[in-house]
Amino acid sequence: MIQNITIKSAGHDPTTDFAADELKKYLNKIGEKNDISRLPNYELIIQESEGNDQVRIEQKNDLCKIVGNRKVALLIGIYQYLRILGVRFLRPGEENEKIPEISESDLNRDIFYKHTASYKHRGVCIEGADSLENIIDFIDWLPKVGFNSFFIQFENPYTFLKRWYSHEFNNYWENKTFTNEEADKMSEKVDAAMKLRSLHHHRVGHGWTGEMLGFSSKYGWESGKKISKEKEPLVALVNGKRELIKGTPIFTSVDFANPEVNKELADVIVKYAKKHQDVDYLHVWLSDDCNNICECDECKKTTPSDQYVEFLNYLDEKLAEAGLDTKICFLLYHELLYAPENAKIKNPDRFVMMFAPISRTFEKSYADVNYENGIPDSPKYVRNKITLPNSLESNLSFLFDWQKNYHGDSFVYDYPLGRAHYGDLGYMAISKVISRDIKYLDKLHLNGYISCQELRSGLPTTLPNYVMGLTLWDKELGFDNLIEEYFEAAYGKNYEAVVSYLTEISALSSPDYFNAIGPRLNKEMAKNYQKIVSLTNEFLNKVIDNLSVVKGVEHHNWSILAYHREVIHQLANALSLIASGKNEAAETAWRNFIDFIKLHEKEYQQELDVYRITEVATNYAGFKYRDN
């Protein structure tokens, strides 16, 4: 341990103290690896100012000052300083960090770095099946790669934790009961991890309508429920009935023509906001389904978005009456993609608009759109007969309609790692789309990006999140430069062979095909998937040769790549069969694939979410087998 690390902080609070401890920890790691005894003295400073996160680093004459304009910015500044020194935070978890070889003189060299974050909102939203350790490690990783926000859907992360601890879709694990009490204790630890790092805290989203109807949002997509007679008048009238859609509260809309709905819904939200004032951005969304909108005579006189905006204005009044300045995120999603015809947000300062193009393609970027001639007029809303658009052009037409009357804060809530990534078997193409999307956000008048995604999305790499976080922090960072930075640290001197291999696999893959955009019978994709099978065979010797010589973090990443090679060998074969119309053989190949990843989940739990890939593939790709 280096004993002479001097860190002076202006004031002490948990985040600043944590930042100082992090700096000291990593300086000691660098010192131990490189036998360094002399370091600068360090001064950590918070100079508060408005605007996006700002960092300034000045190192000269044995003094290094690291300045942030808020606590989370100071913490990010620590990690940016370490990145300048060569530390690489490649995956969640300290065991996945690369400590550089560096001389004492280089470590003590003059450094000047000043940067204002390119975007205000830079975050990730939880999805998939997650252990407590998965969530905590991911939260710890976020500021290391430039993020400043984390979003926990629902009242607490019960749904995502239960999927893991009950081992849904994997009967090779013992199926254990997961209780509310366990979820509450874990949720407190998650909240504490966010608070320690001063990450912007986003919460809830879908579930408010269910809360109003007597069902807790923490159970997510629970089904098999029935509405009470008392609550029936609040539920949307659909096909002549007032009942839960598919027996699922979160899928069910409400009757905004009933005056009690606004009152009861606002009351639930205000009570929550009053109790949870540590939540920075409270998401107020409606149901998580489409074509389920109330068909009563009064509701049919207007549109769902008009009713939604009128409710948001009412909620704003009730929050103001309660003396709460809670920021409310509202959602452009499903029916709510259609802009209101008459209603307008009265107090934009209260709200943040969230554009959520869940059905979009990820085979092109926002930067590829022909904005002069390619944007169609958005279609006229037809109650309970909408079709979600796949094209970026159609999705953007809805955003532009909303922006005609709303000019407040906003960001995109996007899904590259929610299910599209399973179709990019090399993760290279989708990483490039993420980079290009983010660089284009300011031209769309969007001030950031939150990724709705699995936290366990690291097979073969975590390049998509690495690119996402650092490009949101600095959109001038070159994609090719980040590839070199990431792969050289992860794989060592032979990293270019890995880049070439994964790039070729990505070029032969299709997120759209995997996610049911286009027909299942596809001769071209059948051939492409067989080419991927051949590539995995050809790459085997390269994996074996490198695993015999690399050590530490590089060995770990090559071992993950070895596992990935076999995973996509089997998955590409199954996809080739289904694209050829050989459904019976495809199902057999799929079952073998599922059996393989279930057997190996204990070894590669952090890298591949078995629950989620099973759910997505059986919902979209055309396979049937699930381990229920």
Image (cartoon, rainbow, N blue to C red):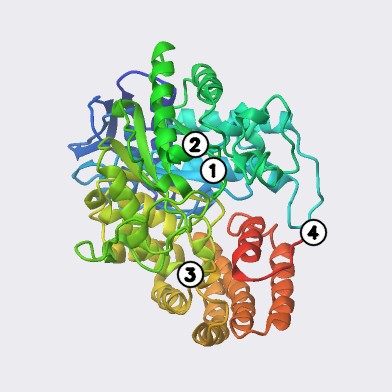
Foreground of the two, 337 or 579? 337
Density class for disc 3 (Cα within 10 Å; few <14, some 14-19, many ≥20) is many
Amino acid under disc 4? Tyr
Cα separation, mark 2 vs mark 1, equals 9 Å
- Asked whether the beta carbons under mark 2 and mark 1 sit within 8 Å of each other, the answer is yes
Residue 162 x %, y %: 70, 42
SS at mark 3 in the image: helix
Q: Quadrant of the C terminus?
A: bottom right
Amino acid under disc 1? Ile
Residue at screen point 41% across, 62% down: 489
Cα separation, mark 2 vs mark 3, equals 36 Å
Please give the residue where the numbered disc 3 appears in the rendered image. 512
Residue at screen point 67% across, 70% down: 623
Labels 4, 2: front one:
2
Amino acid under disc 3? Asp
- Asked whether the beta carbons under mark 4 and mark 2 sit within 8 Å of each other, the answer is no
Please give the residue where the numbered disc 2 appears in the rendered image. 299
Quick one: label 2 or label 1, which is nearer the N terminus?
1
> In the picture shown, does residue 86 fall above or below 310?
below
Density class for disc 1 (Cα within 10 Å; few <14, some 14-19, many ≥20) is many
* Residue 1 visible from this viewpoint: no
Cα separation, mark 4 vs mark 2, equals 49 Å
Please give the residue where the numbered disc 1 appears in the rendered image. 293
Please give the residue where the numbered disc 4 appears in the rendered image. 172
Amino acid under disc 2? Cys
Horizontal side of residue 50 vs 243, given as left or right:
left
Instruction: Count the labels in the image.
Output: 4
